[in-house]
Amino acid sequence: MTFLELNLNTPLQNALIDLGFENPTPIQEKVYPAVMSGRDTVGIAQTGTGKTFAYLIPILRQLKYSDQKHARILIVVPTRELVLQVVGEIEKLTKYMTVRVVGVYGGTNINT
């Protein structure tokens, strides 16, 4: 399977091409249809296997085709480091999309 076969929107497809990705990893291939169908999903895989993109790609595809004028996505993660990682990955995938990404975490001065 390739990312082209996932019927992604052009901006998302272009971002993946820029990143050098042509084929989803096994976790991405398994998670994509579950997330697209609206099912809750738990994916377990080793570090570096593409788990973050596994849920971001279908979510961002759905966002692009949402009927809502101001669609919103909330992603909750347990650590500051993971917040920063997820925000960075979203920024990579939305390079050609008009979205606003905000990472919120505690322990830091709000004016920083």
Image (cartoon, rainbow, N blue to C red):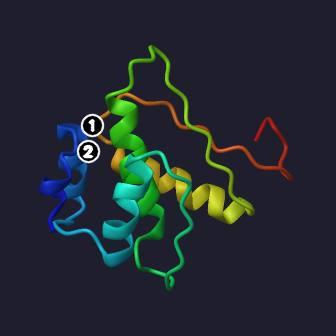
In the rendered image, which quarter is residue 64 located in? top left
For the point 40% across and 47% down, the residue is: 37
For the point 44% across and 52% down, the residue is: 35
As drawn, the residue found furthest toward the bottom would be 46
- The x and y percentages for residue 36 are 38, 47
Amino acid type at image mark 2: Leu
As drawn, the residue found furthest toward the top would be 69
Residue tagged 1: 96
Badge 2 density bin: few <14, some 14–19, many ≥20, Cα 10 Å = many
Quarter of the rendering occupied by the C terminus: top right
| Label 2 element class | helix
20 vs 66, left or right, is: left
Residue tagged 2: 12
In the rendered image, which quarter is residue 24 located in? bottom left
- The x and y percentages for residue 11 are 22, 39
For marks 1 and 2, give the CA distance: 7 Å
Q: Is residue 70 above or below residue 32?
A: above
- The x and y percentages for residue 83 are 64, 56
In the rendered image, which quarter is residue 34 located in? bottom left
From the image, state whether disc 1 or disc 2 is nearer to you: 2
Q: Are marks 1 and 2 in contact (CB under 8 Å)?
A: yes
